[in-house]
Image: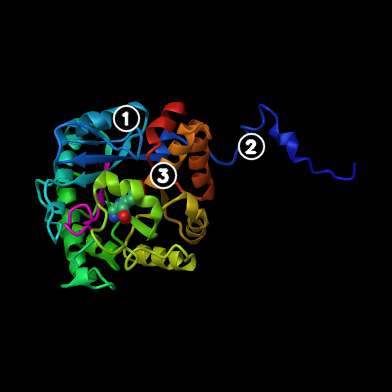
Amino acid sequence: MEFTERPRRLRTDGVRELVRETSLSASDLIAPVFVDATTNERVPIESMPGHERVPVDEAVSRVREIQETGVEAVILFGIPASKDPEGSRAYADDGVVQRATRRIKAETDAYVIADLCLCEYTDHGHCGVLEADASDDPHLTVRNDETLDLYAKTAVSQAEAGADMIAPSGMMDGQVGAIRAGLDTVGFDGVPIMAYAAKYASAFYGPFRDAADGAPAFGDRRHYQMDPANRREAKREVRLDVEQGADVLMVKPALPYLDVVSDVRANTDRPIAAYNVSGEYAMLHAAAEKGWLDLEAVAYESLLSIKRAGADLIITYFAEDIANRL
Ligand code: PBG
């Protein structure tokens, strides 16, 4: 034979593991938890099999279940008891995420990340304060700078409740800087920010919007979330968030945007998170339910691929299942 390179030499049992480039462990994973102020019992989320909205009273037991699998970090999303135009329950001292955080931090040693957005808290479902007559306006916009004040207030109230990390997901310009300044002013300079830096206006968020009741009542989020067509723009978003003090940079969704994860890896020395979103979870479950895919195998391969592309941490609804398998 003329060729000398035989890659198959390193694919035999025993050596394959030795030359493996990427690995996955429970400490890479963050599990989402939905805390719901409108219910007294756990409510299954239909489009996300295995996931539930839990009342504040169940938040600790939910987190303990997650920790039993080896996953130590959770990201909290809240469904408030009531909504208004400014999303005021997002920054209420007795808000659903604040109450759950206090309980979880008092009774477990889990690492608690608070997602920070207003869309679950506003009655119109947008991620910030609206222009006056937005509902009649096809070019609806969220007021950027007024919204930043509310984000900073929310971050401070989440940190006061004991959140270990703040994760702003609203895609307002300047949000990381505003939140950093807000936290620092009141002495929370040790609380890191995980910025949803490159967050796309994606159809893969569908099941989440059912889960967290955060679908916009009208319009869509294309005025503030990124256009899925854009790759270079992600580098710019990431650069801006780094300049504003982001500690961890997130790309979201994950699987359809692995080119972006890879770019961000090449362009920053910060840790990178990727959000394996609700639609990525739901589609694998749906195919597995039909018997078309092996759920555990495709879930594992998905998460491994996200790490291979360059992510250090992964937020995923598969966290418990995969951690159990590892
Ligand atoms: C809120 C938020 C969303 C997700 C996380 N935070 C929804 C959205 O932006 O519409 C989606 C998560 C998922 O689909 O799993 N801003």
* Residue tagged 3: 314
Amino acid under disc 3: Ile
Question: How many numbered tags mark residues here?
Answer: 3
Query: Which is more N-terminal, label 2 or label 3?
Result: 2
Instruction: State the residue in front, 265 or 61.
Output: 61
Three-letter code for the amino acid on which mark 2 is drawn: Val
**What is the secondary structure assignment of the residue under circle 3?**
strand
Q: Position of residue 207 (x, y in %)?
A: 34, 46
Amino acid type, residue under disc 1 in the picture: Gln
The answer to whether residue 168 is seen in the rendering is no
**C-alpha distance separating marks 3 and 2:** 23 Å
Say which residue label 1 marks.
67
**Drawn side of residue 135 relative to residue 278, left or right:** left
How would you rate the neighbour count of disc 2 (Cα within 10 Å): few for under 14, some for 14-19, many for 20 or more?
Answer: few
Q: Which residues are magenta?
A: 112-126
Categorize mark 3 by other alpha carbons within 10 Å: few (<14), some (14-19), many (20+). many
User: What secondary structure is marked by label 2?
Assistant: loop
Does label 2 or label 1 sit earlier along the sequence? 2
Q: Nearer the viewer, mark 3 or mark 2?
A: 3
The residue shown at (45%, 35%) is 25
In-front residue for pair 26/48: 48
Q: Is residue 22 magenta?
A: no
Look at the image and say whether residue 123 sits in the magenta stretch. yes
Mark 1 vs ligand 1: CB below 8 Å: no
Q: Which residue is mark 2?
A: 19
